[in-house]
Image (tube, rainbow, N blue to C red):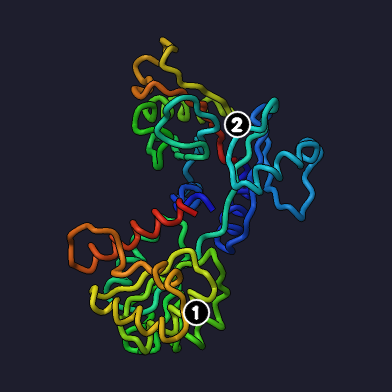
Amino acid sequence: MKNSFDEKILEEAHDWVKANQKVVLATVIQTWGSSPRQVGSRMIVNEKGDFSGSISGGCVESAVVRECIGLIKDNKPYKKIEFKVSNESAWEVGLACGGEIAVYLEQII
Amino acid sequence: MKYSQLKEIIKKKASKTEFAIVTNLGNGLSEIYEPAKSLSKEFETHKEQINDFFKLKKNGVIEKTEIFVETYIRPIKVIVVGAVHIAQYLVNFAKSLNFEISIIDPRGYFASEQRFPDIKIINKWPDEAFKEIGTNENSALIALTHDPKIDDPALQHALNKKFYYIGALGSKKTHANRCERLKVAGFSDTQIQSIHGPIGIKLGGRSAPEIALSIIAQLVSETYKK
């Protein structure tokens, strides 16, 4: 019994799907070093780029939103992405805390 | 993830079932894991490792595989004695936390459904009410009436059942009297000292929402100490 929170993100995803929105679930699956959110943290994104929840402290959310919209546009079911400070392409959205995270994106179909 | 699976997950959460979601990050397939049920072939071969994550209430990728496990644990039962103003704010704060609140108050005019929509309210004296709620060392008690007739039996129940968190509202003087009564009732000093009284961490505020916040903060802190 280590966690005392329930952010109800999946419940929100359910509401979004019921409202005929396309929804992608983004989940933190691995972390290295100091990262703001633990494994299992979630956010949801729809086709318009509205989002709820978080997978970092605001550092990489914008990049994840873009990736999720791309997933919906390309009609891909899932994708794994990593954010590292050393990764130059992620410079703009890199984690200021020096940590690394892997995020799994999956469409609700 | 399939929409039908999302619906099933939400249903399981609502029914307070413990389960895990297992996802193959390599092919996007996912399933719901429960110890008693069997999984499809691709996950079944990793059942032992999945079960290890499940037992430890851990999330993560199983080593040398592409299988991600996310465990869902039952909410912690929190029993609030006294359907008072502070309790209304407690209910609000607990909404984003994994606490399942039940309220006990024999005074009908306090414990109305209108004041506490969607919350289990037991309109009985604590001794009777606890027959309806299964409690154990993973339960928490927040006593708010500062009326010995109502709070004391609930505190005694919580001490006997070894609740991991017991807090009681009241001034230092009220609490000293309460401790004295519990001593007379046969409880040990260690047991009595385990009660958080006066309840809550020191925030300085004295309004109902501020007291509720200080209680919830203490409850969360004690939950992580377990």
Q: Picture quarter containing residue B68?
A: top right
**In-image side of B113 versus B26 (left or right):** left
Q: Picture quarter containing residue B198?
A: bottom left
Residue at left offset 38%, top offset 30%: A61
**In-image side of B29 versus B117 (left or right):** right
Image coordinates for residue A43, horizontal then vertical, percent: 45, 39
Circle 2: is it few (<14), some (14-19), or many (20+) Cα within 10 Å? Answer: some
Image coordinates for residue B116, horizontal then vertical, percent: 36, 75
Q: Nearer the viewer, residue A61 or A45?
A: A61
**Residue B87 vertical position relative to residue B5 in the rendered view, above or below:** below
Tag 2 residue? A77
Tag 1 residue? B157
Residue at left offset 51%, top offset 30%: A72
Image coordinates for residue A7, horizontal then vertical, percent: 44, 50
Asked whether disc 1 touches disc 2, contact meaning CB atoms under 8 Å apart, the reply is no
Q: Nearer the viewer, mark 1 or mark 2?
A: 1
Amino acid on which the number 2 mark rests in the picture: Pro
Q: Is residue B146 visible?
A: yes
Amino acid on which the number 1 mark rests in the picture: His
Image coordinates for residue B196, horizontal then vertical, percent: 35, 67
